[in-house]
Image (cartoon, grey):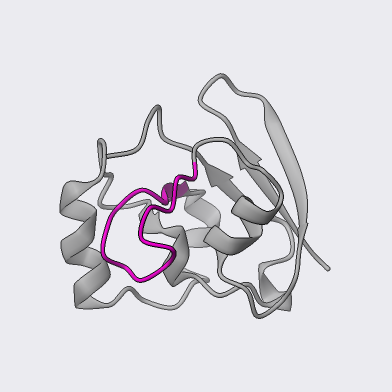
Amino acid sequence: MVEITFVEPDGSKRVVDAVAGLSLMEAARNEGVRGIEAECGGACSCSTCHVYIAADWIDRLPGMSALEEDMLDFAYEPDPSASRLACQITVTDDLHGLLVNMPQRQG
């Protein structure tokens, strides 16, 4: 399992054991992480799985596609240096210890 920490807007932390191969969105949804709405089910056609990746992790992730970048325009308070769509990040063993901050709200 890959341990990922989700930080709620109030600062509370939720550590989940994610299965490699799932998307970060699926891992969060499967574990009941609050704030991941995932209205499109992971099709990258909404921005309701918007998250902020911790600064020391952002460069370890694969780059974002043009579609993901476009969809982030619809996210609540996107941060160009940290925002990603959780549906576009595949959980791998290399992400063990990843820190993900949740926005105040989605879209």
Vertical comparison of 45 with 10: above or below: below
Q: Residue furthest top?
A: 10
Q: Is residue 30 magenta?
A: no
| Residue 47 placement (x, y as % from top left) | 30, 52
Which residue is located at x 37 percent, y 58 percent?
84
107 to the left or right of 22: left
75 to the left or right of 41: left
Vertical comparison of 30 with 13: above or below: below
Which residue is located at x 43 percent, y 46 percent?
52
54 to the left or right of 31: left
Q: Residue furthest right?
A: 1
Which residue is located at x 57 percent, y 30 percent?
8
Q: Tell me the magenta residue range.
A: 36-52
| Residue 31 placement (x, y as % from top left) | 71, 49
| Residue 53 placement (x, y as % from top left) | 48, 52
Quarter containing the C terminus? top left
Quarter containing the N terminus? bottom right
**Type of secondary structure dominating the magenta stretch:** loop
Q: Is residue 43 magenta?
A: yes
Vertical comparison of 89 with 57: above or below: below
